[in-house]
Image (spheres, rainbow, N blue to C red):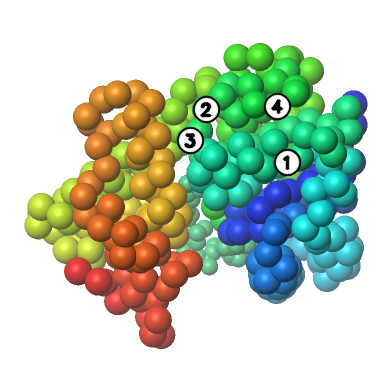
Amino acid sequence: MEIKSVGVIGAGQMGNGIAHVFALAGYDVLLNDISEEALGRSKQMIGQNMDRQVSREKISAEERDAALARISTGSDLAVVGKVDLIIESATENESIKRKIFASLAEHLAPHTLLTSNTSSISITRLAAGTDRPERFMGFHFMNPVPVMQLVELIRGIATDNATYEILAEVVQRLGKSAASSEDYPAFIVNRILVPMINEAVYALYEGVGSVSSIDLSMKLGANHPMGPLELADFIGLDTCLAIMNVLHEGLADTKYRPCPLLVKYVEAGWHGRKTKRGFYDYRGETPVPTR
Ligand code: CAA
């Protein structure tokens, strides 16, 4: 089976990056969201990010224009259900994801492959709620999608080999590398990365260091491109907390308990860059640490 058309459900920061890379690789992309405003923002963001790639000579202006023309947007699940491959990339919340797959069920073409860009939730459990667990997989992209080379491929207990092979081929066509992960909470990248971020928040909470000194330490002391608190703001503090909760509940080990300070930031609605406040305040010219 050759994948030609792709439906991306959820036009947030991951959804727009995923639509971007699929369109550039020549796939027809249908970007779906319940919010017209999110769809408009997302198309604008994709245009800006492609312009940046044109200005850095990563792609030509013709490639950008052709890719943008391959992306259409809409909110109708009946339309998106007919594509070859669906990538659900809604908020990291299991009940929202389950509802999306349930609403899609009646509209799906028999051949359509279902995937979720979940960063932590059980693929086996999500697949079990659909009519095609053998053609359901975890398809996890990293942020920013146009830049990051890795895609995690996660098989649920029922996923068949044909589905895995098709998605591995898609990753190759995107020019990215696939890592195969077993279906355990948060898979590989987030199993390691997000507890490190949570530990950085504990270091802040316990007064070991300030926001600036923690980030500087990991940038200059461990050669990370971003400090852990800057990265947490980039990923979204709500997403970081959701992943810690999945690890804590799924592995039943207290070493994964979310830091109370992370919970407090999320409760305040300070979710990082997307809400303009997190461990840094982004409302001015340059980010200012909030502690
Ligand atoms: N679209 C297209 N290109 C982009 C882009 C985007 N959204 N964002 C950055 N770029 C490109 C820039 O054009 C630039 O390209 P060149 O190298 O050709 O010049 C390059 O990326 C570097 O960007 P900048 O010079 O603007 O900034 P930088 O050097 O500070 O790098 C960064 C930015 C790539 C984001 C870097 O800081 C980085 O790698 N940070 C860590 C990112 C990371 O760890 N991501 C994983 C998060 S975990 C995750 O995603 C999993 C999950 O489920 C939570």
Identify the residue at image location x=86%, y=68%. 65
Please name the residue that numbered disc 3 is placed on: 120
Tell us which disc is closer to us: 3 or 4.
4
Q: Which residue is mark 2?
A: 122
Q: Disc 4 residue type? A: Thr
Give the quarter of the figure containing the N terminus.
top right
Helix, strand or loop for disc 3: loop
Residues marked 3 and 4 touching at CB (< 8 Å): no
Residue placed under numbered mark 4 in the picture: 130
Real-space Cα distance between discs 3 and 1? 22 Å
Asked if residue 145 shows in the view, the reply is no
Which mark lies nearer to you, 2 or 4? 4
Which amino acid, mark 2? Ser
Spatial separation of the CA atoms under disc 2 and disc 3:
7 Å
Which one is nearer the viewer's eye here, 27 or 157? 157
Seen as rendered, the residue at the extreme bottom is: 285
Where does residue 282 sit, x and y in percent of width and height?
39, 76
Question: Can residue 102 be seen at all in this image of the molecule?
Answer: yes
C-alpha span from label 2 to label 1 = 19 Å
Give the residue pinned by disc 1.
103
